[in-house]
Amino acid sequence: MKDDRLFTLDVSIISGPMTEKFAKKNKVISRTIQIRGDQTLEDLHYAIFGAFEREDEHMYEFQIGGKGPMDPKARRYTNCGASENTGQGTRKSAGDVTRTAIGSLGLKVDEAFGYWFDFGDDWWHQINVVAIADQAPLGTYPKVTKRVGKSPPQYADSDNEQ
């Protein structure tokens, strides 16, 4: 089903393996991403992956409908099957990211949800729904419309961290 709505999402890194020096220089690290309602959580993952200049793929999940990131009562949408052992126990997935459209999640403006990337290094993100327009203008989506702060290296011991 075609969902032409345009979701504007502010994606902030709330924790991850950054050095103290990097975190002090980059107090806020966020990206604003626009995505259509008919695009999937997997599309959103790849937009976030590119926006934060990640290099290596890992398992990830989105937590929807809880009280924000890390809420154990949130619905979990994963890229790793019906249930997975995340290092924090086995969790049942509410759906597959490749088949779950953004517009099907029941998101509302000012709602927050979570994105957890790399179950070993634990990159935690909070995603805030900034706006939902009735129709997306012509263009290619998802797209990054704003960047705040430098992207941290995916691995804290990386030589390019500044």
Image: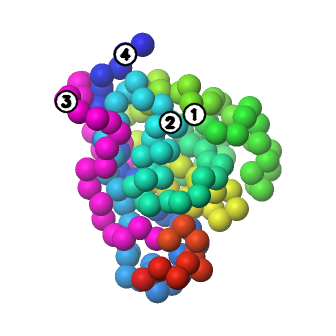
Q: Between 33 and 57, which is closer to the camera in this rendering?
A: 57
Q: Nearer the viewer, residue 85 or 57?
A: 57
- The answer to whether the residues at label 2 and label 1 have Cβ atoms under 8 Å apart is yes
Tell me which segment is drawn in magenta: 128-152
Image height of 88 relative to 4, above or below: below
- Which residue is tagged 3? 137
Q: CA distance from mark 3 to mark 2?
A: 20 Å
The amino acid pointed to by label 4 is: Lys
Query: Marks 2/4: CA distance?
Result: 15 Å
Q: Secondary structure at mark 2?
A: helix
Q: CA distance from mark 1 to mark 3?
A: 24 Å
Which residue appears at 20% of the width and 28% of the height? 138
The residue at 47%/80% (across/down) is 161
Image coords of residue 116 (percent x, y): 58, 52
Residue beneath the point at 47% across and 27% down:
101
Magenta stretch containing residue 147, yes or no?
yes
Q: Of helix, strand and loop, which one carries label 3?
A: loop
Mark earlier in primary sequence (2, 4): 4
Query: Height in image: 37 above or below 146?
Result: above
**How many angstroms separate mark 3 from mark 4 (CA)?**
14 Å
